[in-house]
Amino acid sequence: MRTFRFAVFLVISFFSTVASAEPTLAIMVGGETITLSRSELESLPQQRITTTSPYFEGTQEFSGPSLQTLIDTYWQPGNEHILFRALNDYAVEAPLKQALALDAIIATRRNSRVMSVRTHGPFWVMLPLSQQPSLNTTDNHRFMIWQLSEIELK
């Protein structure tokens, strides 16, 4: 009986730890991978975007660090391309200058709430479509990757 209780305790402890683990975003640069938790992303200067989008109804507010802030923090000479990858392996690669011109943020929150995988999170590349209508094109929409899991600087 004692062994059974101990086994149940271990299983519950394992799943409690897994369930409470913070989501992470991998930043790959120069052959290294830096893993940032939501808390670490939220410790960077935050930007807010209030916008409409083809991917949700109405106007929503998103917050998170700007892509520019991440690049300023992790860029290395020679990095001229960026690759965004989602949990489902959807990926977009572009020249870094093109991506930075989008004024994107890496959203960690939607309407002040953390996002789960079910709600397009935990991280979503968001563009200020309402503030900059010229960004609202099909070509730019491909950068609005939800369930973002990796950013690679090449």
Image (spheres, helix red, strand yellow):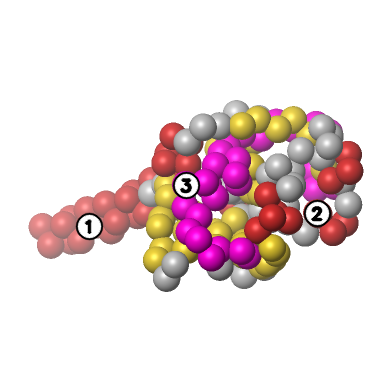
Determine contact: label 2, label 3, CB under 8 Å: no
- How far separated are the C-alphas under marks 1 and 3? 40 Å
**Towards the viewer: 2 or 136:** 136
Rendered view: 136 above or below 93? above
* Residue plotted at (34% across, 49% down): 16
Residue 83: horizontal and vertical position, in percent?
A: 62, 65
Which is more toward the observer, 30 or 46?
30
In front: label 2 or label 3: 3
> How far across and how far down the image is residue 58, in percent?
83, 33
**How busy is the neighbourhood of tag 1: few (under 14 within 10 Å), some, or many (20 plus)?**
few
Q: Residue furthest front?
A: 77
Q: Which numbered disc, 1 or 3, marks the residue that appears first in the sequence? A: 1
Residue that carries the numbered disc 2 in the rendered image: 141
Read off the residue under disc 1.
10
**Position of residue 73 in the picture relative to residue 110 (left or right):** left
Q: Can the viewer see residue 107?
A: no
Type of amino acid at the residue the image marks with label 2: His
Identify residue type, mark 1: Leu
Residue plotted at (70% across, 32% down): 49
**x, y percentage for residue 154?**
56, 68
Whole-percent x, y for residue 129 in the image:
82, 40
Marked residue nearer the N-terminal end (2 or 3) = 3
Looking at the figure, which quarter contains the N terminus?
bottom left
Label 3 sits on residue = 73
Residue found farthest to the left: 2
